[in-house]
Image: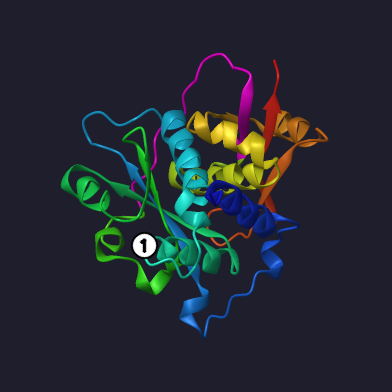
Amino acid sequence: MTDLFAIAHERLAQAVEGRSWERDPEDAADPSTIQAMQIALHIPKQQPPQRHHLLEAAARAAVAVCLDERAGADFEDPEHGYFARAIDTWYRHRIRKVTRRARNAAWDQVQALPGVTIDDTARAFIPSAVHEVPRELSKLQIAGTDLPLEEPGPMRPGVVLFVNASLGMSAGKVAAQVGHASMLFAGHQSVEWARGWASKSFPLQVREVEKGLFDEHRKHPNAITVVDAGFTEVEPDTATVCVLLRSV
C-alpha cells in the first residue's frame, strides 16, 4: 500500500530545505505565481479564545494540511489529486499565509472548504492563487484578529515555538508566522518522528517572549528560525519565530 504520509512529508521536506524567501519565484505580472495558504481564526465576540490557544491551533492546522495524506496523493488521482497539486504549486512559490477572522455562520460555512480544523479554533486550507480565493474565505476580514497577551502557564517538554514579542505583531500576523514555523520544523524531522507527532494531532506550545530570551533560544544548535519577507508589520529579514524540541 502506498504510504501517502511519507510522500507528503518528503514533499514538505524538499520544499523547506534551504528555503529563503528571497529566492522564491513570484511575478507581480502573473497572478498565478502569488500563492497563499489561507487560515481562518475562529474569534467569537462573546467568548474569544485565549491568544496562545489561538496561535497553537493555527500552527497545528498549517502543518496538518501539509502532512495530510491527501497532500501525498498522486497529482492525477481523481479523488485527491487537487489537494496535492494545490500544495505542490504553493511549495514552488513564496510560502505566503493569510489569516482571517471568522465567527458565527461564516465560520461554519468555511468548514466545507478543503482543509483541516483544530479545536474549533483555526482552520487551514489548501493554498491557491490569491486572486482565486473561494468566496466564503475572501469575504472574511483580515483585520480584527488581535487578542491580548497572557501568561500561558508552565512550559512543558515537547515542541515549543518562541515568538519575538518585542516586534509587537498582531495575533493574526503571529498566527501566520507560527504556521510557517510548524511546517519548517516538521520538514526538518525524520518521517517517523513526524508520523508520531501527527498521530497526536501535532501538540506544541507557543510562547511570546522578550527579545533577549528569543535571541538566546535562537542560538541553540537545533533551533529552526522563521525569517520573514517583511510584507506586513515587520521589516524584511526579521526573525520572528524559532522552534525547539525541549526535553525538559
Give the residue at the far front of this rendering.
1
SS class, disc 1: loop
The relative height of residue 26 versus residue 19 in the rendered view (above or below) is below
Q: Which of 201 and 6 lies nearest the eye of the viewer?
A: 6
Residue 187: within the magenta? no
Q: Position of residue 86 (x, y in %)?
A: 46, 65
Structure colour scheme: rainbow
Graded by Cα atoms within 10 Å as few (under 14), some (14 to 19) or many (20 or more), the crowding at tag 1 reads few
Residue drawn where x is 44% and y is 46% of the image: 172
Q: Position of residue 240 (x, y in %)?
A: 63, 45
Residue drawn where x is 46% and y is 79% of the image: 31
Residue 235: tell me if it is visible. Answer: no
- Quickly name the residue at label 1: 79
Left or right for 34, reference 242: left
First to last magenta residue range? 143-166
Q: Position of residue 167 (x, y in %)?
A: 60, 43
Residue 164: within the magenta? yes
Q: Which of 200 and 211 lies nearest the eye of the viewer?
A: 200
Residue 140: tell me if it is visible. Answer: yes
The relative height of residue 43 versus residue 6 in the rendered view (above or below) is above
Most prominent secondary structure in the magenta stretch?
A: loop
Q: Amino acid at mark 1?
A: Glu
